[in-house]
Image (cartoon, helix red, strand yellow):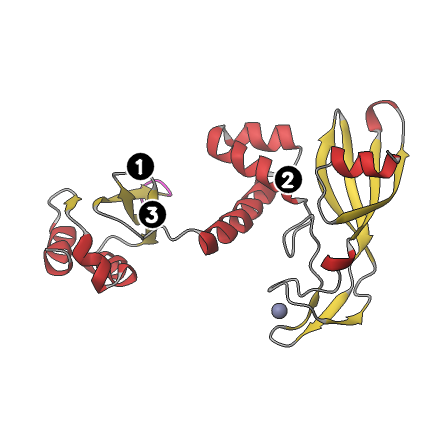
Amino acid sequence: MRSVRVWARLLGLRNTVVEDVIVNGAGEGVEVVVRVRPGWRQRDRCGLCGRRAGRFDNGAGRRRWRALDLGTSFCWLEADAPRVSCRRHGVVVARVPWARHDSRFTRSFEEQAAWLAVNTSKTAVSELMRCSWRTVGQILERVANERRLKVDLLSGLKSIGIDEISHRRGQRYLTVVVDHHSGALVWAAPGRDRATVLAFFHALGEERCKQVESVSCDMAGWIASAVAERAP
Ligand SMILES: [Zn+2]
C-alpha cells in the first residue's frame, strides 16, 4: 500500500487525497503537516449546502485545520481553500470533507472535543485537547447545530418536565424542558415567565401538544397556567 494511503486511513480521512506528509521540528516540538485535497467528487461544492458550484477564486490561499494529535505531536491538515459561487448562497468557501464549514479543526477533532465536553470537566477538555475553553465552546456550537438539523428533539414527547434554572449567580434564568422518557434536555430559552412556557408550546405545535400525556413542574403559576391552557 502506498504510504499516502496509509496516512489517509490512519487519519480517518474519507473522500480525501493525501498529497504529502511533512514532519517539522524535533523532540517535544514535533508537528506533522498533512497536505490534502478533496477527492474529485467532493471538489467545488458549496460550503453551506454541499451543491456543486462553479469555482469563483482561490480565496485566501492555503489553509490549515488542526487534526487529532498523533501521539504527542500536533497534526495539521493543509489544503487550498478556494471559493465557489453557489446559486443559493453566493460566494462562499468551498466545502471540504474533513471539516465543518468555518472551522479550523477537523471533524474527528471536534467530535472528540464534544464527547469530552459532555463527559468530563471543562479543564479536562481544554488541557487534553490543547485548546482554549472558548474554542471548545465554538466547537460545541457547530456540532450541536449539525445534530439539530438531523434530530427533531420535540418529536414523540409524551412525558415532560418543565423547570427553571438560574445562572450568573441567580441573576439570570432559563426555562428548561426535559423528556422524562429519554432524560434529554429538549428545549431551553432565557426567561422564567408565562410567555417563555407558551413559546415552548408554540414550538411544539398544536398536534404534538395533544400527544403530551403528563407534565411535571412545581406549582409556580406561570408554568401551571400555561400548561393547563396548551396541554390540558
Ligand atoms: Zn449553497
Looking at the image, which residue is at 73% across and 36% down? 11
Rendered image quadrant of residue 216: top left
For the residue carrying disc 1, how many other residues have a C-alpha within 10 Å: few (<14), some (14-19), or many (20+)?
Answer: few
Q: Which residue is mark 1?
A: 183
Q: In which quadrant of the rendered image does the C terminus lie?
A: bottom left
Q: Quadrant of ligand 1?
A: bottom right
Question: Where is 89 relative to 208, above or below?
Answer: below
The amino acid on which the numbered mark 1 sits, given as a three-letter code, is Gly
Q: CA distance from mark 1 to mark 2?
A: 26 Å
For the residue carrying disc 3, how many other residues have a C-alpha within 10 Å: few (<14), some (14-19), or many (20+)?
Answer: some
Rendered image quadrant of residue 197: bottom left
Question: Where is 162 relative to 88, above or below?
Answer: above
Residue 21 colored magenta? no
Task: Identify which residue, 220 or 203, lies in the foreground.
Answer: 203
Question: Contact, CB < 8 Å: mark 2 with mark 3?
Answer: no
Q: Residue 70 in the image: x percent, y percent?
A: 75, 29
The amino acid on which the numbered mark 3 sits, given as a three-letter code, is Val
Looking at the image, which residue is at 32% across and 46% down? 171
Q: Main secondary structure of the magenta part?
A: loop
The residue stretch that appears in magenta: 168-172
Considering only order in the chain, which callout, 2 or 1, is on the residue closer to the N terminus?
2
